[in-house]
Amino acid sequence: RIFQTSEKLELANELIAAGFKVIELGSFVSPKAVPQMADTDKLFSHLSSIGGVEMRALIANKKGVERAINCGCRKVKLNVSASRKHNLANLNKTPEESVAGFEEIVTLARQHDIEVSGSISMPFGSPWEGDIPLNDVQSIVEAYLNVGITEISLSDASGMAVPNQVYSICSSMQERYPQVKWWLHFHNTRGMAMANILASMQAGITQFDSSFAGLGGCPFIPGAAGNVPSEDVVHMMDEMGIETGIDIVRLIELSRKVRHMVGHDTDSFILKAGISRDLYKM
């Protein structure tokens, strides 16, 4: 189901009301390849003036920066995959070709006061190549650092990561690149996302992508499920006594609305079971 622009604006405003301070509104990618993202420019035109909330968009190339300039987007996130086959399917480039374009993209963005962060897809494994050598991931991290990007997301787009691996890689990355502000992005394809978040927290990482009701996926990855549900993550943090600044009740109401809009059940456990403190009345 393609959401209308008015629906997306309503949902974004409700995320803000629930307490989210960082929102990835969409992607500046081909509308033919990903029609759900065709109106990302319109969303930024309406929302970019809201203060106190960082709104960013995913980009793959210089054209993405040009679109950001034209619609008032102030932050973009570059993406490259550590999987050669995924990068070819997703971006029609090898990882090396994507990396070679970083400097031109970052230079243009900074000329227009647009902040740039980076992301690396499939650092934990690829459904085509299997294990991804850590050296391949590190070479992309260093390419980002070479153009001045120090905020980097590791994205388990394939849903292949497992907790001990996540802990090991995140610990290694934190030690090797202490200047980097890390994000983690887990898809719940094999039910590992929450455990992987906990493992990366134990390694010292505190910033995670999520999506309401667990929506999302990738058209280029076999069997891809959505990003980990926001309400599941916030509920776990609440129960662990970790402050997020997010109102879990408002978030659940929003995710229920989203589930109704898409017209089918989602991967969210909290939408099915409710929050732990809502005890049954006997």
Image (spheres, rainbow, N blue to C red):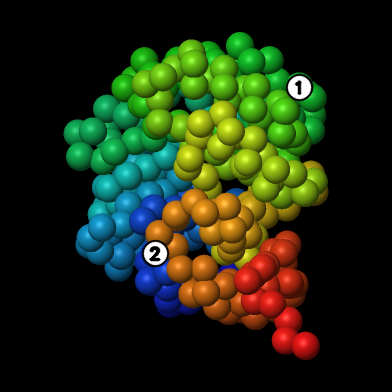
- Disc number for residue 212: none
Residue 80 against residue 143 in the figure, above or below: below
Q: Position of residue 196 (x, y in %)?
A: 67, 39
Q: Residue at x 55, y 78 (%)?
A: 253
Q: For the residue marked with disc 2, what is the amino acid?
A: Gly
Mark positioned earlier in the residue sequence (1 or 2): 2
Of residue 101 and residue 43, the one placed in the foreground of this image is 43
Specify the quadrant of the image occupied by residue 76: top left
Specify the quadrant of the image occupied by residue 266: bottom right
At numbered mark 2, what does the secondary structure look like: helix, strand or loop? loop
Total labels drawn: 2
* Apparent side of residue 6 relative to residue 80 in the rendered image (left or right): left
Q: Residue at x 32, y 52 (%)?
A: 54
1 or 2: mark nearer the eye? 2
* Apparent side of residue 21 relative to residue 254 in the rendered image (left or right): left
Question: Which residue is the site of mark 1?
Answer: 131
Of residue 116 and residue 275, the one placed in the foreground of this image is 275
> Crowding at label 1, few (<14), some or many (≥20) Cα neighbours within 10 Å?
some
Of residue 228 and residue 93, the one placed in the foreground of this image is 228
Quarter in which the N terminus is drawn: bottom right
Q: For the residue marked with disc 1, what is the amino acid?
A: Asp
Q: Residue at x 41, y 49 (%)?
A: 57
Of residue 278 and residue 83, the one placed in the foreground of this image is 278
